[in-house]
Image (cartoon, rainbow, N blue to C red):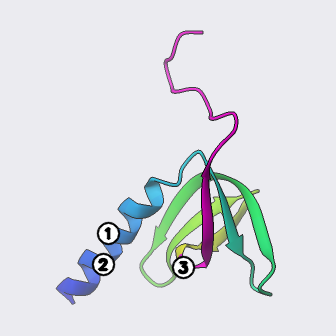
Amino acid sequence: KEVAGLRSDQNLLSANSYLGRNVTVDDAGGSPVTGLVTSVDSDPAAGVSLTINGNPYPLTSVRRIAVASNPPAASGASE
């Protein structure tokens, strides 16, 4: 049980590094979907998911990660 909790924590930390990056995932039908990761969610039953184009995808569906061409400005940054 403790090992599963550690794995879940590690997956959440890993997923957080995808925020603001362009990620390609496989949808439920196996087709690639690419977009900016806007949020990360963790559910005890479903696991960790990334929100891309407004839709959740499991962390396990990630196929490619790239730096966003226009990354969002940091909160509080001066322009």
- Are the two marked residues, 1 and 2, in contact with CB atoms closer than 8 angstroms? yes
- Would you name the residue on which mark 2 appears? 7
Q: Label 2 neighbourhood size at 10 Å, few (<14), some (14-19), many (20+)?
A: few
Q: Where is residue 9 in the image (x, y as percent from the top left)?
A: 31, 69
Give 14 or 1, whichever is nearer the viewer: 14
Q: Which residue is drawn at 55% across and 69% down?
A: 49
- Would you name the residue on which mark 3 appears? 60
Q: Label 1 neighbourhood size at 10 Å, few (<14), some (14-19), many (20+)?
A: few
* Residue segment shown in magenta: 60-79
Quadrant including the C terminus = top right
Q: Which residue is drawn at 18% across and 84% down?
A: 2
Q: Which amino acid does label 3 sit on?
A: Thr
- Are the two marked residues, 2 and 3, in contact with CB atoms closer than 8 angstroms? no
Going by the image, does 40 lie left or right of 9?
A: right
Q: Which mark is residue 10?
A: 1
Going by the image, does 41 lie left or right of 53?
A: left
